[in-house]
Image (cartoon, grey):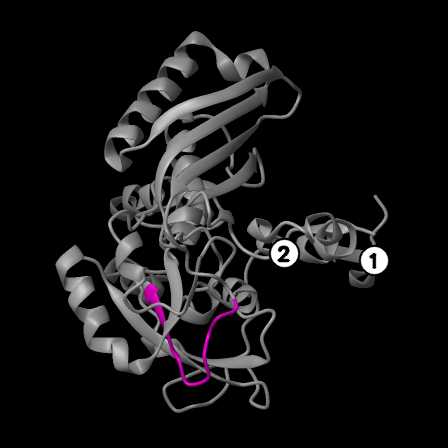
Amino acid sequence: MLQKSLEQQMHEFQIIKKYFSVLSKKNKSSINLNDDIFFDKSKKLAISIDTYVEGIHFIDFKKPNLVIKKILRSSISDLICKGVKPKYYFISGSGKSKNFTPSNLRKISNALKQEQKKYDISLSGGDTVLSDKLSFTITSVGFSNNIIFRNNAKINDSIYVTGNLGDSFIGLSSLENKLKIPNNLKKYFGNKYYLPEICKNIPNKLFLFANTSIDISDGLISDLDKLINKQRLSYTLYLDKIPISKNLEKLMKLKRLKKSDIISRGDDYQILFTANSSKNKIIEKVAKSLGIKISKIGKISSKTTKSMLVDKNGNEITIKNKGYFHTFWK
């Protein structure tokens, strides 16, 4: 296969801008195709849609129940991070007959039933088709008077994130046999990969403090860049403030892993948002009432300042992997 240069690649947002943005120009609800969701304010209707492909978004289909739970949580996360409670979902699947055996279909059905109960959502339609490639598309629907948009950060806003980062990446690395971890930690990290912890009770609380928000799917830095991609702003992230689990701390010491190599690898599905520093007490109160962790990890600045990740002494850290980028050939 011929190797093509980076200059010959286009990422998904370049493709959207070049070929499709013009098609949505008259449709305000599309938000210029530059946010997680579609939002029709007059109808209070919010919609997100995501496609998941074997080998890209999930490693294989040996555990169909866990794969389905993972992709459904990923889909509704797009609504939740915008302040919208999901209500309905549609799921379409394409694949080979061996993917949709009666045994697998029962596992899929049972998994969806469990997720419906957990997140108070209902299956409302879908489609199936035979194909050589296994993939799923999920459309999630919710209703809200408003949403929290991207590109609404303010200079001097603090940057916050829910939960912990990095566990899912470690779980994936273990499942792909790229990282050998102790047996007593395999289940923990495997579950963090397949079963991301979605902040299901936070949607209406976000409006109390968040200026702008996104969920972390592609990676902390990659998604932070998207969050302010239409604004003349920059940011500083403090590595020592970025939250990780106790188990990840243990593993980092055992395997001599660098925190900066782990915290922006994606698949976390935590909420990244900015807020005025005066909202810090409200944020702490909400975190306590919901029983979740919310950490202040950085600050928004003007574009005249370089965006960077720094250590506790303020020294810039070069990060090798900023997250996942969907790239296509020109």
Q: Residue at x 41, y 66 (%)?
A: 257
Position of residue 262 relative to residue 187, above or below, is below
Residue 87 rendering spot, x and y as whole percentages: 35, 35
Magenta includes 158? yes
Task: Report which residue position mark 2 lands on.
Answer: 32
Residue at 50% x, 42% y: name it: 48
Q: Secondary structure at mark 2?
A: helix
Q: Which residues are magenta?
A: 151-161
Q: What distance separates the C-alpha of mark 1 from that of mark 2?
A: 25 Å
- Pinpoint residue 250: horizontal percent, then vertical percent: 27, 62
Nearer to us in this view, 283 or 256: 283
Residue type at mark 1? Gln
The answer to which of 36 and 129 lies nearer the viewer is 36
Q: Main secondary structure of the magenta part?
A: loop
Q: How many marks?
A: 2
Question: Which residue is depicted at the point 59% across and 69% down?
Answer: 229
Q: Amino acid at mark 2?
A: Asn
The image quadrant where one finds the N terminus is top right
Q: Is residue 62 visible?
A: yes
Q: Looking at the picture, how far across and down is residue 175, in whole percent?
A: 44, 41
Query: Which tag, 1 or 2, sits closer to the chain's start?
Result: 1
**Residue 308 shows in the view:** no
**Circle 1 crowding by C-alpha within 10 Å: few under 14, some 14–19, many from 20:** few
Q: Secondary structure at mark 1?
A: helix
Is 295 colored magenta in this rendering? no
The residue that label 1 is drawn on is: 8
User: For the residue carrying disc 2, how many other residues have a C-alpha within 10 Å: few (<14), some (14-19), or many (20+)?
Assistant: some
